[in-house]
Image (cartoon, rainbow, N blue to C red):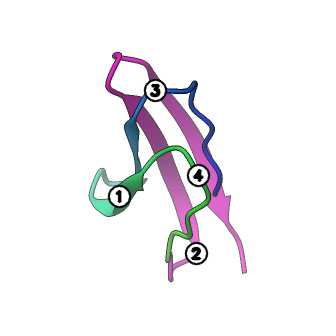
């Protein structure tokens, strides 16, 4: 996964399973690898320190 933030902003990317449990979290603003072992639906959430919140649904199919 890659997240791009405007210069000077920081944030967090979190991956949740469909039941709302957090799978992994890491700092935003670069390239990171999320380890997801199970097929299913996930929500990827970007939250910046300035209050921006972006959600994306991701389906992992193997």
Give the mark nearer the N terminus: 1 vs 3: 3
Relative to residue 47, is residue 32 drawn left or right?
right
Tell me the CA gap for discs 2 and 3.
36 Å
Q: What residue did someone put label 4 on? A: 30
| Residue 13: percent from left, percent from top | 43, 47
Q: Which mark is residue 39?
A: 2
Is residue 55 magenta-colored? yes
Tell me the CA gap for discs 4 and 1.
13 Å
| Residue 61: percent from left, percent from top | 71, 72
Q: Which mark is residue 8?
A: 3
Mark 3: secondary structure: loop
Nearer to us in this view, 50 or 18: 50
Quarter of the rendering containing residue 31:
bottom right
Give the mark nearer the N terminus: 4 vs 3: 3
Q: Which quadrant of the rendered structure holds the N terminus?
A: bottom right
What segment carries the magenta color? 36-62
Q: What residue did someone put label 1 on? A: 25
Where is 10 relative to 25, above or below?
above
Tell me the CA gap for discs 4 and 2.
25 Å
| Residue 18: percent from left, percent from top | 41, 54
Q: Residues within 10 Å of mark 3 (few under 14, many from 20)?
A: few
């Amino acid at each position: 996964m890659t997240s791009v933030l405007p210069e000077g902003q920081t944030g967090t990317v979190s991956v949740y399973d469909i039941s709302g449990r957090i799978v992994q979290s890491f700092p935003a603003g670069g390239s990171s690898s999320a380890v997801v072992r199970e097929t299913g639906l996930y929500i990827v959430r970007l939250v910046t320190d300035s209050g921006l919140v972006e959600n994306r649904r991701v389906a992992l199919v193997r």
